Image (tube, grey):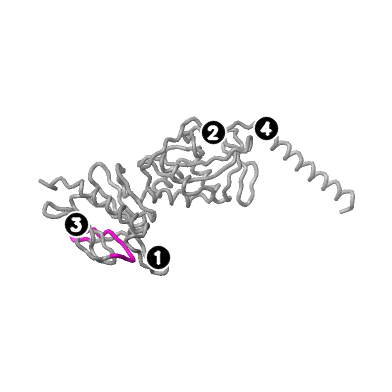
Amino acid sequence: MNLKNMINKINDFVNTKKEEYELYNQKVANSKTFELTNQIVSNNNINDGNSYEYASMCPYIDLSFAKIIDSIIPLNEIILSVNYFTQKKDNESYVMVLTNLRIIIMDKEKYRNYNYNEITKFEIITKSLMSQIIDINDIIISLDVSQEELDTIYNLITNIDYRNNYIIEKSKYLCGIRPVYQRLNKISSGITIDDNKNVVFHDKKINNYLCKYDDILNYEVLEDNTPVLKRKTNESSHMMTFSKKECMHMTLRVTLNNNQVFEINILEPTTFNNIYSHTDSRYLTEFNFVKEIIDKLDSMNDTLYR
């Protein structure tokens, strides 16, 4: 290739990039913007397990933001994806939350809901390793995700079959029940209850045990395999006499009428198997958490005090 042809190719490349840059700037100049219309109202009924899970979905939000997300999500709604983006028109930053029911665009103070069928355009303008420029309904955004994550978001928004299969996978831990009550701690252990007295016991959402409340023979809290709380009866309270002042591990053990027994982890041993004193804040948090579960289960006993 002679020098003249080389120069022409370089000029063509530069002109092409210049045109692409000008076209991109024009798109940004003409871009619409998200207008958040709903005020976020503080809600103290937060599930720690959900908040930690949402924070893990997006590296650009902290636990406090994850708790705000949890505060606007009802029990019957499943979060599929949490992503951070910047609106290129004005450089305002927002979080996009995809659920089984809607798309939420939000910041720490306001949010707006969109139905999936409202998204009529989702086009990729430019790609890079960890940030993708997207045209979504004529709003130009920089979405801080990898290409693989973008593919998931695109399919969740545009492909109803893909979204439905994703929802099925994300909601498996519920074992088919529709929650009316749920308590999950930091490690996602706890219970979910529906309005037919079905109870799902969650061991870190990895092992999930479904049963009818009436099929439960007993439930008790163990510290290092020593019972410290138990199911309340007409003859005795749920508190047990014990002299422990510390422990390494706390579990909730459930025994069914058919003699099936399972345990869910509440307080796990530390990395170095350190002891939790009964005055430690972590121990107190988890003890109060599991006591709330025991109280809730006791409240479902129709024969208590009769």
Q: Earlier in the sequence, mark 1 or mark 3?
A: 3
Q: Is residue 120 left or right of residue 205?
A: right
**Depth check: 173 or 293 in front?**
293
Mark 4: few/some/many CA within 10 Å (<14, 14-19, 20+): few
Residue identifier under label 3: 218
Which amino acid lies under the numbered mark 4 shown in the image of this protein?
Answer: Ala
Q: Earlier in the sequence, mark 4 or mark 2?
A: 4
- The label shown at residue 29 is 4
Which amino acid lies under the numbered mark 3 shown in the image of this protein?
Answer: Asn
- The label shown at residue 120 is 2
Q: Is 247 within the magenta?
A: yes
Which amino acid lies under the numbered mark 1 shown in the image of this protein?
Answer: Thr
Q: Is 179 within the magenta?
A: no
- The label shown at residue 270 is 1
Tell me the distance, in whole angstroms, between the alpha carbons under discs 3 and 2. Answer: 53 Å
Mark 2: few/some/many CA within 10 Å (<14, 14-19, 20+): few
- The label shown at residue 291 is none
- Residue 127 percent across, percent down from the top left: 64, 47
- Residue 152 percent across, percent down from the top left: 51, 47
Tell me the distance, in whole angstroms, between the alpha carbons under discs 2 and 1. Answer: 49 Å
Q: Are marks 4 and 3 in contact (CB under 8 Å)?
A: no
Q: Quadrant of the N terminus?
A: bottom right
